[in-house]
Amino acid sequence: MVYLAFGSNLTSKFGNSIFTITKAYAELEKCGVQILKKSSFYRSKAFPDPKDPEFINSVVQARANIAPNNLIKIIFKIEKKFGRLRLNKNDPRTLDIDIIDFNSRKIKIKNRIASLQIPHSSLEKRLFVLMPLIELKSSWKNPESGRLIVQLLSKISRLGDNKITKL
């Protein structure tokens, strides 16, 4: 299984963040990524600057019969179509799609378009990813640390600033 996290805190030419993410699901499917389940949408404060617009987040469970580096190319193409600009790290954005898990493998990709680690190194601190993810697979385990999602959520829920709202 492949798990993808979606985030948006700027309106795109396609509409508000929820509409943008919903339209991005359809774009993924046009590219051969079969979405099996979708989480609810969540609202969270922007990080690291909470003064930026709030994010809308969701996670999908999908099947992708392609290599991770090809999935990255598809994701970048979709983000660009929706107006994503990559100027500064953590800038507000129309669409962000992250690979959370790719068939329970630990993967490092470094090429001319991306340098990333799957699962994301900060995943265990991201309530806006873990809450939607637990809706889809309550027994999910981080392939990097081996920790179960319920353990991660138990730890993270004690952090005061880490609040999200299910929509």
Image (spheres, grey):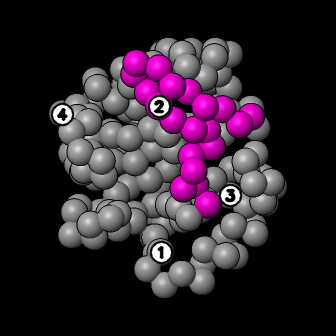
Q: Is residue 122 magenta?
A: yes
| Residue range (magenta) | 105-124
**Where's the N terminus, which quadrant?**
top right
Amino acid type of the residue tagged 2 in the rendering: Ser
Q: Is residue 140 above or below residue 32?
A: below
Amino acid type of the residue tagged 4 in the rendering: Lys
Could you tell whether 31 is left or right of 136 in the image? left
- Which mark is drawn over residue 54? none
Tell me residue 116's x, y (percent): 51, 35
Could you tell whether 44 is left or right of 150 in the image? left
**Disc 4 and disc 1: Cα gap in Å?**
30 Å
Q: Look at discs 3 and 2 and give the one toward the viewer.
A: 2
- Which mark is drawn over residue 162? 1
**Where's the C terminus, which quadrant?**
bottom left
Reading the image, the residue beneath label 3 is: 134
Looking at marks 4 and 1 on the same chain, the residue that comes earlier in the sequence is marked by: 4
Reading the image, the residue beneath label 2 is: 115
* Residue 144 in view: yes
Decide: few, some or many residues near mark 2? Use Cα within 10 Å; few <14, some 14-19, many ≥20: few
